[in-house]
Image (tube, rainbow, N blue to C red):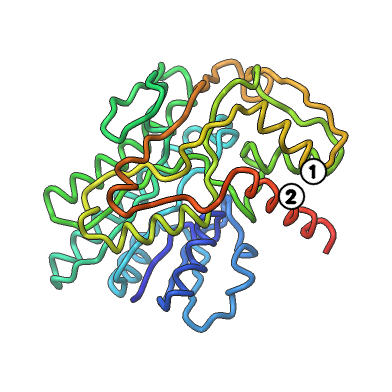
């Protein structure tokens, strides 16, 4: 099988690329390294079935040339992290919408020309739910966004547009595709540079710096190991009954951000203090957040019998150990 991974040099994309190579695929990675790094693929960079292209997926000629040879496309290239969204909302919107439209248009055209059924996976986000007040989010829930004056919501809206485009291609052109809404994916090689909370906590605790918790720390999140997420994604793509559907992908076990910080400090055997910072100081006066972000995984579990293999403490311990290795080679 020939497979394209856009954003394959990123955190999730690099783990997905490794998994696809392990199952025997020929893999092409396209990444402009705006937020990723080809160092994430160091362990497989010399693999004979891997081709890496350091270029933007927005290149029309490149997309047409590469897609013609593909069996599957995993589209993970997108804006990353709340910090980047707050700082560069225009770029975040453009990075999310245009490449998705380009890939879908080319796949529809190619499939109609030669009759092949190239499959497409769209990496979406829990951000599309906005600030829906339900305690657990189900895929068919309403999307509830805040004011357009709050740049934070532009990310969720742009990913929702991606989903609308993808589902329209499924309905109108029978393009086989799956949409996965990721919830707080964590694991080795993730960076805290763009506001990702767990690596940021671990870096601070191991460095003896204050662990900074935003607001009061009572926000609840669910953290899923990247290996569990990759397994779910590849299984969905191999399941025809999943085509044309949206799936929450992640863990459904919530933890408060303050409790997460406490666990990190204890498990890292750190003397770091836990300090609090307002959202205004962290991201600007127009930033809004969601108090609780917990997925309902019923659809995922009933479709592919998914069960996460990693518990949160296992994830934290692995990341602490991997960070120690990175800083003390």
Mark 2 is surrounded, within 10 Å at the Cα level, by few (under 14), some (14 to 19) or many (20 or more) other residues, namely many
Which residue is located at x 83 percent, y 64 percent? Answer: 329
Q: Earlier in the sequence, mark 1 or mark 2?
A: 1
Q: Are marks 1 and 2 in contact (CB under 8 Å)?
A: yes
Give the image location of residue 259, x and y in percent: 67, 28
Question: What's the distance in space between the residues labelled 1 and 2, CA to CA?
Answer: 7 Å
Which residue is located at x 13 percent, y 48 percent? Answer: 171
Which residue is located at x 45 percent, y 44 percent? Answer: 250
Give the image location of residue 268, x and y in percent: 79, 43
Q: Give the left or right position of residue 120, taking residue 30 as reference.
A: left
Q: Which residue is mark 1?
A: 268
Q: Which residue is mark 2?
A: 320
Could you say which is closer to the camera, residue 74 or residue 87?
A: 74
4 to 196, vertically: above or below: below
Give the image location of residue 292, x and y in percent: 49, 24
Q: Secondary structure at mark 1?
A: loop
Could you say which is closer to the camera, residue 296 or residue 164?
A: 296
Which residue is located at x 72 percent, y 56 percent? Answer: 322
């Amino acid at each position: 099988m020939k497979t394209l991974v856009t954003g394959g040099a990123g955190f999730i994309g690099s783990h997905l690329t490794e998994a696809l190579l392990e199952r025997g695929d020929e893999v092409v990675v396209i990444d402009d390294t705006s937020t990723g790094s080809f160092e994430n693929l160091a362990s497989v960079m010399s693999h004979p079935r891997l081709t890496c292209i350091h270029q933007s997926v927005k290149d029309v000629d490149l997309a047409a040339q590469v897609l013609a040879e593909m069996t599957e496309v995993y589209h993970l290239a997108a804006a990353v992290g709340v910090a980047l969204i707050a700082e560069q909302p225009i770029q975040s919107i453009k990075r999310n919408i245009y490449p998705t439209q380009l890939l879908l248009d080319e796949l529809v055209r190619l499939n109609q020309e030669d009759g092949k059924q190239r499959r497409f996976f769209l990496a979406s986000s829990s951000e599309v739910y906005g600030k829906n007040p339900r305690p657990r989010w189900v895929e068919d829930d309403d999307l509830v966004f805040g004011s357009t004056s709050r740049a934070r919501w532009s990310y969720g809206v742009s990913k929702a547009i991606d989903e609308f485009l993808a589902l329209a291609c499924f309905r109108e052109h029978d393009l086989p595709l799956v949409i996965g809404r990721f919830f707080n994916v964590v694991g080795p090689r993730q960076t805290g540079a763009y506001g990702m909370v767990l690596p940021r906590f671990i870096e601070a605790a191991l460095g003896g710096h204050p662990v900074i918790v935003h607001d009061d720390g009572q926000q609840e999140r669910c953290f899923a190991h990247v290996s569990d997420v990759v397994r779910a994604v590849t299984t969905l793509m191999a399941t025809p009954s999943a085509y044309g559907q949206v799936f929450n992908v992640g863990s459904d076990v919530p933890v408060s951000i303050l409790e997460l910080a406490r666990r990190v400090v204890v498990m890292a055997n750190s003397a770091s203090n836990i300090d609090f910072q307002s959202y205004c100081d962290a991201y600007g006066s127009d930033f809004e957040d969601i108090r609780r972000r917990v997925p309902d995984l019923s659809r995922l579990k009933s479709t592919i019998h998914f069960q996460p293999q990693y518990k949160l403490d296992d994830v934290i311990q692995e990341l602490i150990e991997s960070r120690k290795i990175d800083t003390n080679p």
